[in-house]
Structure formats: C-alpha cells, structure tokens
Image (cartoon, rainbow, N blue to C red):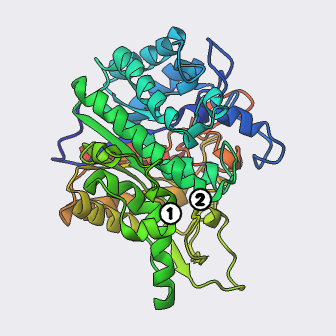
Amino acid sequence: MSLHLPDGSTLAYGAATASYQIEGASTEDGRGVSIWDTFAARPGAIRDGSDGSVACDSYHRYEEDADLLAGLGVGWYRFSIAWPRIVPEGTGRVETRGLDYYDRLVDALLARGVSPTATLYHWDLPQALEDRGGWLERSTAEAFADYAMVVHERLGDRVGVWATHNEPWCAAYLGYAAGIHAPGRREGGRAHVAAHHLVLGHALAAERLHAAGVTDVGMALNLAPFWPETPEAEAAADGIDAIRNRLWLGPLVDGAYDDGLLAVAPELADPAVVRDGDLELARGSADWIGINYYTPFRPAVPDPSIPVHHELDAYPGAAPVSIVVREPRTDIGWEVDARGLEELLVETHARTGLPLVVTENGAAYPDDRLVEGAVGVIDDQDRIGYLRDHVAATERARAAGADVRAYILWTLLDNFEWAEGYTKTFGVVQVDPKDQTRTPKASYRWFAEHIAGAG
C-alpha cells in the first residue's frame, strides 16, 4: 500500500468506479440532489428510463466490493466522491454522514491492502449549484475548491493521490453544448465558459491541496487521438482536437490557451471570463495526468453517406466533420484500436513531462455467452481481448519512454452507464439488477491472473 503515486518501476494495476454510477442510496444520510438525479428524471434523457437511485447499491455493499478488489489483486482503487453527499447544497452546510461513508470505504480498502485514490468530481454536481448557473458561473469553481478541502480534511491522512476532475470535456461539452449529459443544456459556445471554470476549479483546488501538503494532485482527461481520413479533413480536425485535448493541456503546461483554440472558442479570449492570473494558476498545478481512453477518432470531411457522430454538437465553433468508425466495434459502437492508447501516452508524456496514469480503459460488450460448466458466469472473451491488447499498448508506451505509472481498469462493476442507463455493461463483475448479486466474469479471472503474473 502507498499514499503516493506508484514509482513506475513496474506497471501498477487498479480498478475504477464513479459515485453516481454505483452508490445508489440517493436520498440517504442527508445527500442532496445532483444534476444527474434531475436529468435522469427527464423523459427520454436515459435510454432505458432508469436512474442511479439504486445503481449497484455500493453505499451499503462497499465491503463486498472491497473484497472483489482484493480478489482481483489490484493495488489501487480509483473511486469518486459525491459532492452532494458532502455539501448537499454545494456550499455551506457539511453533511458528516456523507464523510463517514467515505471514511468507512477508505478504511475497508486499506484493511485489504488496496490503496485508495479519490476523484473529487465525476459529474454529480449539486443541483443547487446548477440552479445558480452551474459551471457557467465562476462561483462554482470557487465552491469546488472549498468542497475539495472539506474532503481532504477528513480523508487526507489516508488518501494521498487525488484527481480533481474526471473528463471535464464531458462535463462541459456533453452537459452544456450537446445536452446529452446532465444538466442537459444546449448553450453552444457558452460551453467554453463552463470548460474554463472547470480548469479554474482544478487550479484553485490544486493550489489549496498543495498548500495542505498533498504532492500527488492530477486530473483525469479523456484525451483522444484524431486520425484524419484525408488531408482535407486535417484542417477541420484541428478544431475538435483543440477542444478535446489542447484546451486542458495548454493551461496545465503552458498557462495559456493556444491561438488555434481561441479561433474556435473566442469566449476564452474574453477577459471577463478568463481573468488575469487564472491560467498562470493552472500552469504546473498538476503533478500527474490521467488518461481515459476507449477509442480513436477518424474525422472526415462531411459526407452524407457517413452518419454524423452524435457527440459532434459538443465541439461548438469547430468545423463540421463526419466521424468514420471502423470494425471491430464494442457494444457501444466505439472502434477498437489499442494503438490509440499507445500514441496518447507517448505524445502526452512528451507534451507534459509528467507522470501518467491510465485512469480508465475498458469496453462494453453484450455479455451474452456463459462459461461452459460454470453456472451464470459470463464468458466475455471479447473484453479479455480488449484488455489484453490495451495493457500491451501501455507497456509498449512505457518501453518507448513514456512515464506511465499505472493501468486502471474501467470498471469493476456493471453499473449505471449515464445516458445509456443499464443497457451497456463495462464491468468485470456482473451485477444482477433485481437483487444486486455480484458474479465475477471470465475477464475478472483473466485480470487477476495477469496481475499475479505481472507481479
């Protein structure tokens, strides 16, 4: 066990989850309403009409889930804190019963030899803050830093590795531009303002965490490799690359938004939004970078024969493109190509010089085959192949000089998959929605054996 980032001598292994996706207990022990509670109640917002009110009931079954982590043999567990459990209204009153839950969870992990790493924001913003403008308001970034310190004060003696945000691109652009994630708003270029406030929230929280003695503060980014299909698509791809990748790395490394980004996001040139000192505060604020990777993107010039990717509304200001998706694909429709992860790791290390962690990687598959002779055990050879290839890609990136410290699997449990509801399964453990019974899949056994062999 360690309270610090792995040293990189060998590749460490972990598993990840997120609070709204697994905890349930959405009205217990003083938890406030989150934007995902509100969004999921909107007719048609979630594919199967479900929500996270029960999810995997991990709020009550955390000991069982800690046992599953121990059985995998992982050294690390990346979980997220539900802001509405801690500060139900987003600011002001602190709910100690919420802190008590994470106390119990952290102690359960440590008792099993698993190092906890906490993500402070995995999208479940308190609804009270959204009612006041959410991430479109600078005050939300300031409230986030206050909340971060409340959590650190309780858990900081046992949690040393912290991620501020998970996939802030999704929070800003799927939430405030495309409208397909909570809070479900379609504000166009105003989403760039939300993105800046997420950068600022990270910087403000990192400054205070560092002042409190934390040495391992990072951010988990869903950076994406863009592989234009034609030379004509290359210029168009620059705009979406700027929003998806450079918007986050520019402040963290250079303390600046580059000219190509400002061309598609002029809102970020507004001094009323990006105030003096904001970007300088962000520069050097990350001690490590997390990379969440699932699929590459192949932009093409707009072509009526190629379906327009549903997330393209999430790049306001960028030139329109089509996205080519090649076979093989996962059940969620994402192309499988592990070379994208290798490329991202090598290029991000060259860009930042920082230690890297693969903070999420995994795949949704139908899980419709059973292991012969094993009652109820899913034989997910497709997922095993995906994981094997991406672990190998991570090791290739390390061999090429990228300072990759850990590979963290997404995800431990089948769970509430955001707008997809319970229709897509990413877990290495099946969860029966009727009684919450956990059944490890063949991929669980494979991952455990791989970790044992790697050790």
Residue 108 is situated, as x and y percent measured from the top left of the image, at 41, 18
Residue kind at label 1, given as amino acid type = Ala
Q: Which residue is drawn at 65% across and 30% down?
A: 127
* Callouts 2 and 1 close, C-beta under 8 Å: yes
Q: Which quarter shows the N terminus?
A: top left
Q: Within 10 angstroms of label 2, few (less than 14), some, or many (20 or more) residues?
A: many
Q: Name the residue under label 1.
A: 265
Q: Which quarter shows the C terminus?
A: top left
Q: In the displayed structure, does residue 138 sit left or right of residue 320?
A: left
Q: Pick whichever of labels 2 and 1 is earlier in the sequence.
A: 2
Q: Name the residue under label 2.
A: 189
Q: In the displayed structure, does residue 53 sit left or right of residue 146?
A: right
Residue 329 is situated, as x and y percent measured from the top left of the image, at 58, 68
Q: Residue at x 56, y 24 (%)?
A: 90
Vertical order, 382 against 115 (above or below):
below
Vertical order, 116 against 276 (above or below):
above
Residue 74 is situated, as x and y percent measured from the top left of the image, at 35, 37
Residue kind at label 2, given as amino acid type = Gly
Please tell me whether mark 2 sits on a helix, a strand or a loop: helix
Q: Can residue 337 be seen in this view?
A: no
Question: Gap between marks 2 and 1, in whole Å?
Answer: 7 Å
Vertical order, 296 against 420 (above or below):
below
Q: Can residue 376 be seen in this view?
A: yes
Q: Residue at x 53, y 21 (%)?
A: 91
Q: Foreground residue, 181 or 15?
A: 181
